[in-house]
Amino acid sequence: MQKKKEIIQKKINNLVKEYFSLPKEEIVSNKLKIPLNIPTFGADEVNEAIDSLLSTYVTMNEKVYKFEEMFASYLGVKYAVMVNSGSSANLIALSVLSNPITKNHIKPGDEVIIPAVTWSTTAFPIINIGAVPVLVDINLNNFNINADLIEKAITKKTKAIMPVHLLGNPANMPKILKIAKKHNLFVIEDSCESHGAEISGKKVGTFGDMGTFSFFFSHHISTMEGGMVVTNNEKYAELAKTLRAHGWIRELKDRGKIAKKYPKFDKSYLFVNMGYNLRPTALQGGFGIHQIGKLENIIKIRRKNADFWINKLSKYNKYLILPEKKEKTGERRVWFGFPLIIKETSGFSTKEMTDFLRQKGIENRPIMAGNLDEQPGMKLFKYKVSGNLKNSEFVMDSAFFFANHQGIGDKERRYVVDCIDKFFKSK
């Protein structure tokens, strides 16, 4: 029976490989479409998932643990704890730092400083733990929190800074860490859009107390859904493992020692803290094992695309604010998308340009959730605004990004420029 199963599975694997080896349709076809993202996975990931399904062992297992080790090694960090999404990664990181067993932990009513322009799941997990998000304005050159404004936002209630490396752009971590050290604050890096971005050769997500990543379908690498919490603090990593799975001890390093303290309980049902059920599946872990090896090449393609567009579109500097041409020394941007800001003096609206590009098959999106202070969902909860949010308001009204991924090559790059040229000619 086992032999027959192996033969059948081999046939399935070969069929999957054959399916994925079929000629791929060009992204720019007769319909001239450039989608916001395309799959980063292929036959290897699908066969790995099928292996898990056929084995019937589909919940968190060794495949997840292996991917955790591989991702930690890639970042150069000691510990990585996988969860079911990037937003869950933020929730776990904040729950670790607000847990009673964490020294000087974040308490209800304490404040966490974040950029005003980010995705909703930077702010909402702060609210989930009973803390108060404090919105600070951003820089226009990289959409990240303006580090020069952070100290003005600090009060007696401030307990943490949560910078976001938005759109693959590293935030000013050296300055943020200096401020955090001066005021004894935690630092949680939301790196969900910036896998592999660097500052002075050190990867983002590894500077602060904890870092988070997302492996959603549209990100640099994908595990369908999925996220990761990373840290160099063993206590934080162990607590993250407890919190992601009910508060039990099953994945803990010292589970045997802990179980001896409570002999009345079955060690598989011993709960030493609060917890959620935010575990990833074996399928997600299996995807990650194959995805991690593709990341550097994906980054290389995205960087090549961005360099091309910056050079070719610089002739429109009178109308557009483009990303800076040169990176700071030691910096590596990894380009989640390619952003453009329409100047107020351009003579046309952002909607005119985005609609035109969509008509040409070039998908585009606003800069994440825009200015969070303008989002109706925020009004339901307590939060604060530090200073004015002039740049965040401007980005909300005047900026967007279009696709930049591994499926875009020379032909697609040129098509984007041609369409933008046509838009300006029409004006």
Image (spheres, helix red, strand yellow):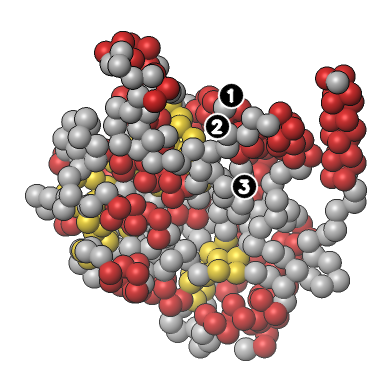
Residue kind at label 1, given as amino acid type: Glu
- Nearer the observer: mark 3 or 1; the answer is 1
Classify mark 2: residues with Cα within 10 Å, few (<14), some (14-19) or many (20+).
some
Given residues 311 and 391, the one toward you in this image is 391
> What is the x, y in percent for residue 136?
27, 61
- State how far apart marks 3 and 1 are (Cα): 18 Å
Residue kind at label 3, given as amino acid type: Met
> What is the x, y in percent for residue 208?
33, 37
Specify whether 232 is left or right of 38: left
* Point 68% across, 70% down: residue: 362
Q: Name the residue under label 1.
A: 62
Classify mark 3: residues with Cα within 10 Å, few (<14), some (14-19) or many (20+).
many
Q: Name the residue under label 3.
A: 224
> What is the x, y in percent for residue 293?
66, 32
Given residues 237 and 395, the one toward you in this image is 237
* Point 61% across, 38% down: residue: 284
Specify whether 101 is left or right of 395: left
Confirm whether residue 357 shows in the render.
Answer: yes
Confirm whether residue 198 shows in the render.
Answer: no
* Point 39% across, 35% down: residue: 246
> What is the x, y in percent for residue 92?
37, 41
Q: Earlier in the sequence, mark 2 or mark 3?
A: 2
Classify mark 1: residues with Cα within 10 Å, few (<14), some (14-19) or many (20+).
few
* Point 90% across, 51% down: residue: 23
